[in-house]
Image: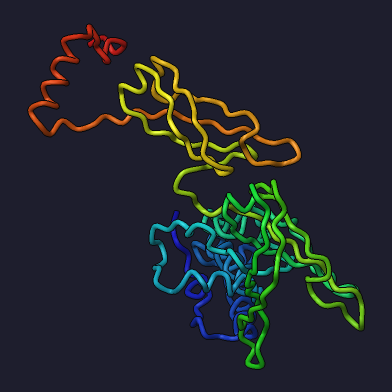
Amino acid sequence: MEYKDYYKILGLERSVDQAEIKRAYRKLARKYHPDVSSEKDAEERFKEVNEAYEVLKDPEKRTAYDQLGSGFQSGQDFRPPPNWDQGFEFHGGGYTDTDSEAFSDFFESLFGRGGFNQGYGGRQRRQYSAQGENTYARIAIDLEDSYRGSSRQITLKHTVLGADGRPQLQERTLNVKIPKGITEGQQIRLAGQGEAGIGGGKAGDLYLEITFNPHRLYHTEGTTVYLDLPLAPWEMALGAKVQVPTPSGSLKVTIPANSDNGKKLRLKGRGIPAKQPGDMYIVLQTVTPKATTDTQREAYRQLSEAFDFNPRQSMGS
């Protein structure tokens, strides 16, 4: 996937104000509109211009895009950093008349197919409502927070237009209660913490979408938790009782004799403690010790003589 420099597409510096972005877009949209343009690549350029404007016209999208930095070059291979938009507070936001399905993979990787915040509901701005808009942000918690439930202090960044017409970041800090059993993708609603109402109207709500921080031991799918458990070859062959860590505490697990690499042992109800608790799976992984001494090499030779075993038999070799 290629990085797109939206400022370069519109022929702008990154320091421009919102009014300059609008003027540049109108000029280029007229120049490359397929109905009137004689340029050979007019249709493709028109799509690029609309995509760039889709991002830069919205101060929130623009600020999030700017966070990626200016160190990338147009056409450079690009993958968005994990949780790149974590902690940003967003509204819905309108769209240009362009069909967003025509936007690039680069746009989709940052803002989703169909426009930004589709994961949060993709709400449109209510121009004349007295009630404040709902706002949306994504926060990362530890898996253990879901097992225990916890309280956390979070800092959210949101965008406002400064007096100079350029987007500026502001921060606010909130105390959030993490409910026990919450899973990735679920939302926490903070009533009245969205945008302030107009003329004394009721404030909107803030919705926090949950993601989990990467864990050195576990990974999750819904309410199911997985642990890759390293075992010595003799533990796999002979069976063993080993102490296994779980997010809710350590426990002793019996490894059946003659277990295959990748075999899964189910620990019922040991997954995320949601209303319907998930399970935990221990995935057995053989770790072969290196033979670094004469005694160890001899042990491997004796092992090879004791077994009539060809691991490549199924390959016909």
Observer-nearest of 148 and 315: 148
Assign the C terminus to one quadrant of the image. top left
- From the viewer's side, name the closer residue of 287 and 257: 257
Residue sitting at x 63%, y 68%: 54
In the image, residue 38 lies at what x, y percent? 54, 67
Q: How many marks?
A: 0
Q: Residue 84 or 210: which is nearer the viewer?
A: 210
Q: Residue furthest bottom?
A: 163
Q: Looking at this rendering, what residue extends furthest in the left direction? A: 294
Quadrant in the rendering for residue 205: bottom right
Q: Residue 190 appears at what percent x and percent y? A: 78, 64
Q: Which image quadrant for residue 125?
A: bottom right
* Vertical arrangement, residue 300 with respect to residue 227, above or below: above
Q: Is residue 260 above or below residue 12?
A: above
Residue reaching furthest to the top: 308
Residue at x 44% of width, y 35% of height: 228
How far from the left and from the top, in percent, is residue 51? 59, 64
What residue is drawn where x is 41% and y is 18%? 259
